[in-house]
């Protein structure tokens, strides 16, 4: 057990971390950066302990992964049990129950009461790639619409879907074709006014799809219901519903990328639940399995089943140990009511952040839901000048 308390035993990084950082430079590609230069040897709940005995509060959470905390007892027990039984067979060759049980659980938890199917993968990027493959196969169309500020991963197709050049795309092109980008409904920075953001962003979206692609050529629209890496951008209420309705009217597959916003982070199981949006396909990963690598595409049975047998899969996708961890994580989220806890974090934090905004003048916008909260720093609150450092 690690006491849930911050302890600074040495400077950060301490001598052992510095020695490891030197080994890292000599052995690990410079392309793989590290945030904090402290090397971790143990973690429990919200505290990390580094190799020099410092205990640090885990604001990183493994990039929105350890929703149930590190060292969760249910997850540890499930993983240990599964490892002792077997670690791998490859579901496509010799199947096992855990994969099916995760798919059943996702059908129950994801938005909408329709019949659903799932396919399991290893990472968020792989889930997004497969969601696009499924949408193209089901519709016989090619074009995919993605939003400004989007983040969908680092593989070739998902780099193409991701908006930001640095650090994700710089010098890594050429990118996949048939990807079209539209403005995100970003109220704080909408060119006219936050009040007009909903109508105008929706109009730009429909105009661009119509004029540049053609509805009948559009396979899918993919959106993070709250953008994660792009800065926790929350579209105005009604935006997602209208995009979903537009997609339904035109036979376009509406994909909600809930890789980051899913699993209780926003105070709901999924960010789409907030306004009752029911996507055709949902991608999940990150928080799904208590830190074990697992991802999923879950969606309407008729879309998911449109793919030919053998068209989806991979060696490790839905690994049994990761599936056991996922079942235990989802059980913990329900038992410990993490949705209520996320809402309590919002209730505690937002008034404090408002107070800091008033006192310091450097916070232009406070946004997000549940525990998925952000502030946007500015030089000048009235002018909204971005703060560069
Ligand atoms: C992190 C993230 C991904 C990519 O997930 P990986 O597991 O890193 O491949 C995709 N979409 C969103 C919204 C993400 O936040």
Image (tube, rainbow, N blue to C red):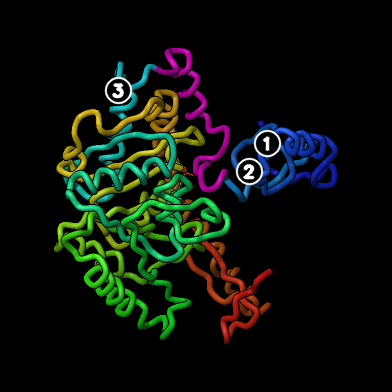
Q: Which residue is mark 2?
A: 32
Q: Residue at x 51, y 43 (%)?
A: 65
Residue lying at the far front of the rendered structure:
174
Which residue is at a point 41% across and 33% down the rendered structure image?
A: 326
**Residue 5 placement: quadrant:** top right
- Pointer 3 or 1: first along the chain: 1
- At mark 3, the secondary structure is loop
The answer to whether marks 2 and 1 mark residues whose Cβ atoms lie closer than 8 Å is yes
Q: Position of residue 336 (x, y in %)?
A: 45, 41
The disc, 3 or 2, on the residue closer to the chain's N-terminal end is 2
Q: Is residue 79 magenta?
A: yes
Q: Is residue 335 magenta?
A: no
Secondary structure state at the residue bearing disc 2: loop
Which residue does the numbered mark 3 point to in the structure image?
92
Which residue is painted at 30% across and 64% down in the image?
240
Q: CA distance from mark 2 to mark 1?
A: 7 Å
Residue situated in front as seen by the camera: 301 or 109: 301
Distance between the alpha carbons at the discs numbered 3 and 2: 32 Å
**Which label belongs to residue 28?**
1
């Amino acid at each position: 057990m690690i006491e849930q308390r911050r302890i600074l035993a040495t400077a950060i990084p301490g001598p052992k971390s510095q020695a490891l950082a030197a080994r890292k430079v000599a052995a690990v590609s410079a392309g793989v950066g590290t945030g904090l230069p402290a090397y971790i040897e143990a973690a429990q709940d919200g505290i990390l302990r580094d190799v020099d005995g410092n205990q640090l509060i885990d604001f990183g959470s493994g990039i929105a992964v350890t929703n149930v905390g590190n060292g969760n007892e249910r997850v540890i027990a499930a993983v240990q049990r599964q490892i002792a039984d077997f670690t791998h067979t490859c579901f496509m060759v010799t199947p096992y129950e855990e994969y099916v049980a995760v798919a059943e659980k996702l059908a129950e938890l994801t938005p909408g009461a329709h019949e659903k199917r799932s396919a399991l993968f290893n990472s968020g990027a792989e889930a997004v790639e497969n969601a696009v493959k499924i949408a193209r196969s089901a519709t016989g169309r090619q074009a995919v619409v993605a939003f400004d500020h989007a983040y969908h991963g680092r593989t070739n197709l998902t780099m193409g879907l991701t908006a930001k050049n640095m650090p994700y795309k710089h010098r890594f092109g050429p990118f996949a074709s048939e990807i079209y980008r539209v403005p995100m409904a970003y109220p704080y920075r909408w060119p006219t006014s936050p009040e007009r953001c909903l109508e105008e962003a929706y109009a730009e979206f429909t105009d661009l799809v119509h004029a540049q692609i053609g509805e009948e050529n559009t396979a899918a629209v993919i959106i993070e219901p709250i953008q994660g890496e792009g800065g926790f951008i929350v579209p105005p209420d009604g935006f997602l519903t209208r995009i979903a309705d537009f997609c339904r009217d035109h036979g376009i597959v509406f994909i909600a990328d809930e890789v980051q916003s899913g699993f209780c982070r926003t105070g709901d199981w999924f960010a789409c639940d907030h306004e009752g949006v029911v996507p055709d396909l949902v991608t999940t990963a990150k928080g799904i399995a208590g830190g074990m690598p697992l991802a999923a595409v879950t969606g309407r049975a008729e879309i998911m089943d449109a793919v030919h047998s053998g068209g989806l899969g991979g060696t490790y996708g839905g690994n049994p140990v990761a599936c056991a961890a996922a079942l235990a994580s989802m059980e913990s989220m329900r038992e410990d009511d993490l949705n209520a806890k996320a809402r309590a974090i919002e209730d505690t934090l937002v008034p404090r952040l408002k107070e800091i905004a008033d006192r310091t003048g450097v916070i232009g916008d406070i946004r997000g839901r549940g525990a998925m909260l952000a502030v946007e720093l500015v030089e000048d609150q009235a002018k909204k000048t971005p703060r560069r450092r």
